[in-house]
Amino acid sequence: MTTPSPYRQTGSAARGAGPTVRPTVAGRLVFLLLGGIALLAGLNGALLLLGVWAPIDSARLAEVHGPLMVFGFVGTVVVLERAVAVRRGWAYLSPGLLGSGGIALISPLPVILGQAALVAGSAVLLVIYAEIWRRQAAVSTGVQVLGALAGLMVTTFWLRGIGIPQLAPLLILYLVLTIAGERLELSRISPTVDYRAESWMLGIGLTLCFGAVVALVWPVTGYPLLGVGMLALVAWLFRHDVATRLVRSTGLPRYMACCLPAGYGWLVVVGGIWLLRGPVYSGPGYDAMMHAVFLGFVVSMIMAHAPTILPAVLRRPLPYRPIMYLPAALLHLSLLARVLLGDAYGWPVLVQWGGIVNIVAVLLFVAIAVVSVVRGNAMLPARTVQRVAPSVSPVRGSLL
Ligand code: HEM
């Protein structure tokens, strides 16, 4: 079942909004390439941070690993999808600035140039949301706006010299609220999602943002508030996300129904750390907090959504293949070893090996995705072929 996109306009509405711009697929590939370079450089930085051999031995790559991964890689890819959805030429400035900001961060240029580009890219993202809001003023858009505001705050504060450890809650909310807003949008067909459920989601988003700002000034008060907010968000997602109920289906819906709850589960770790330990700025708790969110939740979401979102960006099918379970399982198992054994019980060797297998899982998924896009639907049994309808919204895949 598919739903029409509220982001897209047709007929007179579209004509009234002025000319639409459809960048070529090659143009969009350039943005994906920028994100891909940021990913590879970020993984190289991750190896250096783990203290093991890396292809490029550069202190700069280790220093910028976090913002490079969050904004240069994930930010570029997520915002590119938003730009495609609003169909305005200027909207591509946002992924362009985030992607080139990532490249500037890993280049010999002063770091401040990359930081300034990330601030500008985050500001343009808010203009994109203003355009989306103009077309559909929905709670789901509001929650994503909160995420975008958190992103703008992080990049601005980082430019002004505040360290990433102090900005961790805002950095985490940037992607968590963006994804949660998107899940709310997709779950509006769920019988349990009514006005009350939407109000709860908005309240949770506002509590989290308030907690993140309080945590900057009074960490001892702000972090428990963040913990409660994060656990409430997980409860909301498990209760209302329609995709989690498709676990008994087959093919892509079942694959997504496995990846989503696994990702939501990792948010419990973050909520628990914030609630029980309060502020964590370094050490194993810091590694656990960051990667439970960014690998356990965010990368799991990317793996789940890639077969429905990338085709809309690339105008080529990325068919689901059962082999996609392999990197997803590898990611979660290695993260369990790294976070729940290595970080929690102080076994650095497990953190190192878990981290290395995390990297293998991410690269394996990228390789499977690239091969799937290049091959298209060829060599797939008919029952696993997913149709890619050009009229389906890039943000609402054919799953629901
Ligand atoms: C794929 C495997 C990855 C490995 C092995 C890895 C490894 C590391 C290590 C060892 C640290 C230092 C932790 C500490 O200071 O205690 C770190 C920090 C960090 N990582 Fe990762 N990482 C990976 C993926 C990611 C991803 C995908 C993201 C975001 C999307 C990310 C975001 C961060 C952030 C934000 C920090 C904190 C940086 C700072 O304090 O400046 N990492 N990572």
Image (tube, helix red, strand yellow):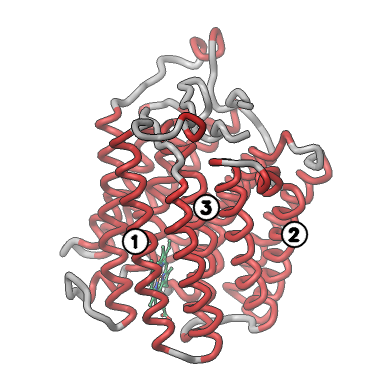
The quarter of the rendering in which ligand 1 is drawn is bottom left
For the point 16% across and 64% down, the residue is 108
Task: In the rendered view, tell whether residue 112 sits above or below residue 225.
Answer: above
Q: Quadrant of the N terminus?
A: top right
Tag 3–tag 2 contact (CB < 8 Å): no
Q: CA distance from mark 3 to mark 2?
A: 17 Å
> Which residue is labeled 3 in the image?
301
Q: Amino acid at mark 1?
A: Leu
Tag 1–tag 2 contact (CB < 8 Å): no
Nearer to us in this view, 190 or 182: 190
Q: CA distance from mark 3 to mark 1?
A: 18 Å
For the point 44% across and 43% down, the residue is 321
Tag 3–tag 1 contact (CB < 8 Å): no
Q: Amino acid at mark 3?
A: Met
Position of residue 119 in the picture relative to residue 337 (left or right): left
> Which residue is labeled 1 in the image?
68
Relative image position of residue 182 (x, y in whole percent): 59, 43
Q: Amino acid at mark 2?
A: Ala
> Which residue is labeled 2 in the image?
235
